[in-house]
Image (spheres, rainbow, N blue to C red):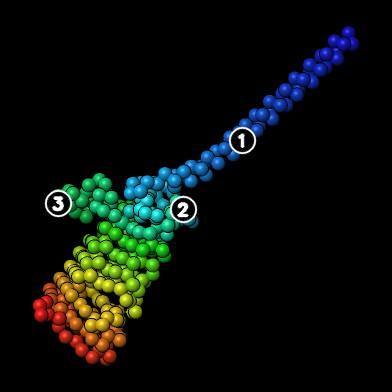
Amino acid sequence: MEKKVNLVKWKAIGMIGITILMFCSCGDGPQQRGDSGAREGTASSGTAAGRLTEGKVQEETDLDIGERHYEWIRYCQDGEGIRILGLRTKEDILVIPAEFRGHPVHSIGGSDEEMDPAGVLAEDGIVYSYMKKLLPWNRDSKNRLKKIIVAEGIRKIVGTGFAWVMADEVVLPESLAYIDEFSFYNCRVRKVAVQSKTARLESWAFRFSHMKEIELPDDFQGEIGVECFSQSSIETFKWPAIEMKRGIFSYHIFGDCKNLKEITFLENQKKIEISDNEFINCPKLKSLTFPATTGEVRPWPLCG
């Protein structure tokens, strides 16, 4: 009898031990899975960056970049960095970051096919109200941004990077080296502030844009391409003191700018040459202001 009682006790103690062990195991299970899930999330993020394929356009929605939240991004790996083709936010100020997925963002924009995968540009009789299918920076055709700030470190705006964008102002960084042809084509931007002193503004970069003002550093040493502002809505322009051996040279940069009213040449421009047709079809242009330091102003004929 004594032995049976002890046996029952040991059986009871064994059952209690098993039960405790099961509870501990159940408690550890979710914790382990939770840790594993956290690690998987981190690995997934790293893997996502690792899955970037050269030239392959990708899209993501509802994401955080740094301390800012964005609704949508279109991007691709280009060389050793990232090229952003579109970015949208609910805020009225859009900041284009200098880093994404652990890679530096070195440029903005792309080809028509990359910027417009739906083929909207190929449609006949396209009007601006339908551009909501295409707009890579605005949520829809009624949404206008107060400001777009391009982060320091980004070097290029390529293709039709900011074509059709709607914003009161676009601020470009000191690091910017290049603005491609038609980058601001037909944009609804009132002011563009270029902080770079050496950027190349390619031919037709702002053609047909609704930009009223472009601000360049007074000591700008970059280049302004042929017909850069032609047929735009620019109203006034302060010509920076570009130092060139032959002086300031202007060739048909402002053709057909029907709203252009005034151009001011800044100090230290000793020689200014202007082509015969520089201001052709600029009916509102009333004055050209030259600094006292200017020694010579003369037309530059197309021939001879």
The type of residue carrying mark 3 is Gly
Packing grade of label 3 (10 A; few <14, some 14-19, many >=20) is few
Location of the C terminus (image quadrant): bottom left
Residue at 17% across, 48% down: 123
Q: Which mark is residue 125?
A: 3
State the residue position of label 2: 102
Q: Is residue 220 rendered to the left or right of residue 21?
A: left
Dots 3, 2 in contact, CB < 8 A: no
Q: Secondary structure at mark 2?
A: loop
Q: Nearer the viewer, mark 1 or mark 3?
A: 1
Residue at 35% across, 53% down: 78
Q: In this picture, is 59 found above or below 235? A: above
Q: Residue 157: percent from the left, percent from the top? A: 31, 61
Q: Is residue 212 rendered to the left or right of residue 2?
A: left
How far apart are the two marked residues, 1 and 3, measured between alpha carbons? 60 Å
The picture quadrant where one finds residue 211 is bottom left
Residue found at the very far right of the displayed protein: 2
The type of residue carrying mark 1 is Gln
State the residue position of label 1: 32
How far apart are the two marked residues, 2 and 1, measured between alpha carbons? 28 Å
Residue at 20% across, 70% down: 226
Q: Secondary structure at mark 1?
A: helix
Q: Mark 2 vs mark 1: which is more N-terminal?
A: 1
Q: Residue 136: percent from the left, percent from the top? A: 31, 53
Comparing 18 with 270, the one in front is 270
- Residue 13 can be seen in this image: yes
Q: Residue 185: percent from the left, percent from the top? A: 23, 61
Q: In this picture, is 285 found above or below 38? A: below
Q: Mark 1 vs mark 3: which is more N-terminal?
A: 1
